[in-house]
Image (cartoon, grey):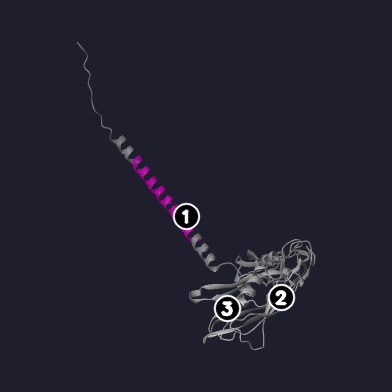
Amino acid sequence: MSPKLNFSIKNNGPVRDSLKGKAAGRSADEKDFFKKSLLIILGILILLFLSFLLSFFVAVRGAEKTLVPNVTGELLIDGLINLQEKELYPRVQVRFTEDPMEKDHIISQDPQAGSVVKAGRRVKLTISKGAVVDKVGDYVGEDLRDVKNQLQALFASYKPLLIVKEPVTTVFDEAPAGTILEQKPEAGELITGLTEVEMVVSRGPVGESYKLDDYSGLKWQDALTRLIRSNQPFEFVLSEEKSEMKFATVMEQSPGAGEVILSGTPVILTINNPAKIGKNERFGIFEIALPDYPISVDLLVEKILTAGKTQTILEMKHPGGSFSFPYRDEAGSSYVLKIYDEKIKQFNIQ
């Protein structure tokens, strides 16, 4: 027979009570740990909050105040040292000035000297680069008109420091008319203020000689056309004698017809008053004294029409000096004289 196994359940009450005691102990420890962790986190937050408050009040209070020094007129390096001593920082910008002696100097500052600002503030400094041109250029061999245009463009935005002294000296030379032969001051000389450059300019080779045409008896319009075509300078003079001639014609000329003259010699023509003109017409001579140009210039006379339009009356090369031409036109008409397209004078017929 198989042996019988007997199982019996004994009372384990004391063991269960022991397990419950251990669980209760662990729960108390966890509560203590949680409280301590909470206090630590709270302490950290309080410290962060206090640090924030401290930083905020420091920021609100700001840096110490300081007095802006006067650095205008000083060399840049000296001005920077003065600002550094006041715990100020520069913000630099540069530009050209009219005075070449201001180069590398502080010409303005912002804030102004004497202002009270916080330390660490930036001060805007404007530094001079000097004049646009600080030395006399080498103009020998260049065309006088080109040099004048170059200087005009160079000093368009600044007070001129370099100009061509007028009148220039002109001489006959094999170089093309208008070529600069000599200059004073010489190239490379430093500019310390307004400087006038004296120049010797070529008038070109000695003009050719030729026999003068006979203009006597020609209508003034025909004589004027022939003179313009040959670029021969001229003057018109109105005779004081009364004339019965219907049209204004050339009565005299100087130099006389057939005389040998040099190219560019002015021809003086004397014309009469026309015997009769329209009721609203006017006849006369326009006269002006132009400068003696070193080379012949482009001269233009235009009649001003309506709506801003113009009509070319005459166009020629002219050396300067006395200039005159006749007109016969309606009262109220206007004419304008130009040199190189620049208006010199306007006159109205009364």
Q: CA distance from mark 3 to mark 2?
A: 23 Å
Magenta highlight range: 22-50
Sequence-first disc among 3 and 2: 2
> Is residue 150 found left or right of 45 in the rendered image?
right
Is disc 2 surrounded by few (<14), some (14 to 19) or many (20+) residues within 10 Å? Answer: some
User: The residue under label 2 is which amino acid type?
Assistant: Val
Q: Quadrant of residue 115?
A: bottom right
Q: CA distance from mark 1 to mark 2?
A: 109 Å
The answer to whether residue 27 is seen in the rendering is yes
Q: Amino acid at mark 3?
A: Tyr
Cβ atoms at labels 3 and 2 below 8 Å apart: no
In which image quadrant can residue 132 be found? bottom right
Residue in the foreground of this view, choosing between 347 and 40? 347
**Residue corresponding to mark 3:** 335
In the image, is residue 202 above or below residue 215? Answer: above
Q: Label 1 sits on what residue type? A: Ile
Q: Is residue 270 magenta?
A: no
With respect to residue 230, does 49 lie above or below? above
Residue 44's tag is: 1
